[in-house]
Image (spheres, helix red, strand yellow):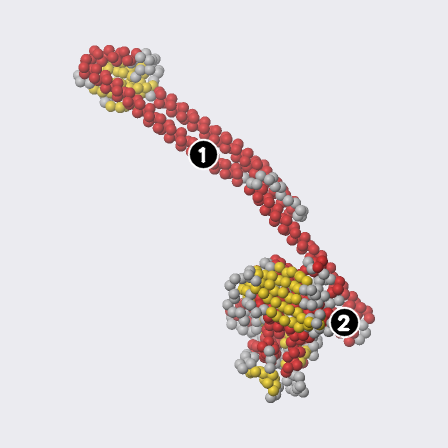
Amino acid sequence: MSNASPVDSCASGAYLVRSMRLLIIEDDRDAADYLVKAFREVGHVADHAADGEEGLALALDGGYDVLIVDRMLPKLDGLAVIGRLRAKHVTSPALILSALGAVDDRVRGLRAGGDDYLPKPYSFSELLARVEVLARRHVGRGEETQYRVADLELDRLSHRVVRGREEILLQPREFRLLEYLMKHAGQVVTRTMLLENVWDYHFDPQTNVIDVHISRLRSKIDKGFAQPLLHTVRGAGYMIRDGAR
Amino acid sequence: MTALGKLLRTTAFQLTLVYLVVFALFAAFLLGYFAFNTRRLINEQIVGIVDTELQLLQVQYNQAGIRRLVGIVDVRSRRPGSSLYLVTTPTGEGLAGNVGSLEPGILESEGWVETAYRRLEEPESAEHNALVRVSRLPGGIRILVGRDLDERERMFHIVALAGRWSVAIVIVLGIVGGVFVSRRVLKRVDAMTDTAQTIMAGDLSGRLSVIGSGDEFDRLALNLNGMLERIESLMRGLKEVTDNVAHDLKTPLTRLRNRCEAALRSANTAADYRRVMEETIEESDGLIRTFDALLMIARAESGEVRDGMAEFDVAEVARDVGELYEPLAEDRGLTLEVEAKQCAAVKGNRELVSQALANLVDNAIKYAAPAAKETSGAVNGERSGIVVKADAERDRVVLTVSDRGPGIPPGDRSRVIDRFVRLEQSRSLPGSGLGLSLVSAVARLHGGELKLEDNAPGLRARISLPRVAMPPQQAA
């Protein structure tokens, strides 16, 4: 869990790709108000529904980039909302928020048609990073065979990484780490997201092991180059981006 | 419910009633069969006697004529307990015999017939039944020989009486027995119910009484007592945990509150506030981590995750976790080696076993790193390395994490597995005191155990898990 307040605009807002329309289905009014306000502060538009039926109706009207759905809702359970949306071919990505943080509960959420799962309590920066990744995935980018950020190139087929004219040799895991970061270039990627997607672990290692992996990777791709590409976003995570732009 | 109502409603009593009906029916059937056969037997006897006499009289008549016949009949008629005799002329006048009256028309019908009759010397009112046979002799003489049926009737009465009595006795004995048995059962069940009620009322130390007869009630009581024992120990454990949780969560909460209060009182600049806010968030993240760990342990201990178990290779887990922590170990001046060549299949929750192993490696790095720094990375000339090993023994899979850190004194080794236990010397290092509890809970969930051993110097943590015979499909 990382720490950042929603007003910490340097954590997220500055890297905003585009404005998103979000629907927050959450019965806790305080939590919902906080989220609506926080998303607005970083430049997104967020609507709020206080129960499952209202949320379903709003989501069916469409036009949302990402749905943020609480697991337990009055009238209609969060998983049921997602299930009905999927049955009606509404494909807007949905992120499930749940106080039940257990492994199999997460699996159940994803099986019901959710695209990501975040246990409560969460930090806003974690939520924001995941929502932005979901929105971008929905637009249909990211499954290319080659990624390129500035002069750094990664070829997913030949497993080659080149910076400038120099080939960089990476361990398999380092390759996957870089691959994930480059797939989401320009977006904040949190430590938990890295653990989940690169290592497939859904628990929280007590010591921040990811930081060490990142600094190793950084020493391989950034060392000796004038322009660093792999940035630490304070209180949120990491980001690969072309600093010149 | 009244006591009688309760008695009548017991299974024992109802069973007794069913048995009663079955036995009564059986007795009735038996006596009925007996009566029927006796009657038949008596009939056969009568028929036999009458036939013989009739034959004899016919022979006498044929040989010596009517006079002789009358003479014999007279003699026989006077014997005590004699059969019935009547000899008549073709017109129906009586010549000899001991029959006073018959039902009309009997003499006209030849063959066997049952009739009411009266003997000669008897008063008008007397009437008995008899089985008689009428035979026509040459010359128009008719002869009737018969036998009284009193014997048969008497026999029948005796049997009927016996039947009534035996059914009555069966019913009385059955009811008395049923009441006795069901009262005995009721008494014990009532005692159990009473105990159960006091236990429900909150006194978990109550136990059902065991008489020692080894009957089904004793066995039931023993099992229920075992169950109560388990519940009580679980409740005790739960209470302990709750107390610990309360204590260990209140401490950081107090810290958190104090810090905010202090900031309100004395912070002046925005930067001051910001720092306090950041610290507060950090502290609450720590609290959340503690909560997560507690919930995880509770889930592992409840066996709730058992549904999602699958086979996986522990050696692979060891390699993955080793790979995750290797850079961190190097960063702290330690080496981390993984010895896990052979595939070691286990059935369980891969995520939980990974987390358990990660906890052990994390601990090893945390405690061995300061020691490594002091000796500049070498103990007795060798690099102070951490070794993660996965071995497949015959029926166990053993995961060990060995370090060259300060180790744990033998007396504390079982204690540190308990929740929230942190040794004095480790208070300065970050941690919740839940890491080893989780490892132990995960090991137990998988039917294994966690053991802490001396690595001389250092600590060797050993998780042994039951091995699955069939190796997983692919061992990467």
Location of residue B85 in the rendering, given as x and y in whole percent from the top left corner: 27, 16
Q: Is residue B178 left or right of residue B79?
A: right
Quadrant the N terminus of chain B occupies: top right
Task: Give the answer, above or below, for where B315 lies relative to A135.
Answer: above
Q: CA distance from mark 2 to mark 1?
A: 89 Å
| B267 or B346: nearer the viewer | B346
Vertical position of residue A176 compared to residue B60: above or below: below
Quadrant occupied by the C terminus of chain B: bottom right
Quarter of the rendering containing residue B26: top left
Residue kind at label 1, given as amino acid type: Phe
Mark carried by residue B23: 1
Q: Position of residue B17 (x, y in %)?
A: 49, 36
Q: Amino acid at mark 2?
A: Val
Return the residue found at the far front: B381
In the picture as drawn, the residue positioned furthest to the bottom comes out as A165
Residue at image point 69% right, 71% down: B382
Cβ–Cβ below 8 Å for labels 2 and 1? no
Dot 2 corresponds to which residue? Answer: B276
Q: Residue B272 location in percent, x, y?
A: 78, 74
* Mark 1 residue crowding within 10 angstroms, few (<14) / some (14–19) / many (20+): some
Q: Is residue B29 left or right of residue A233?
A: left
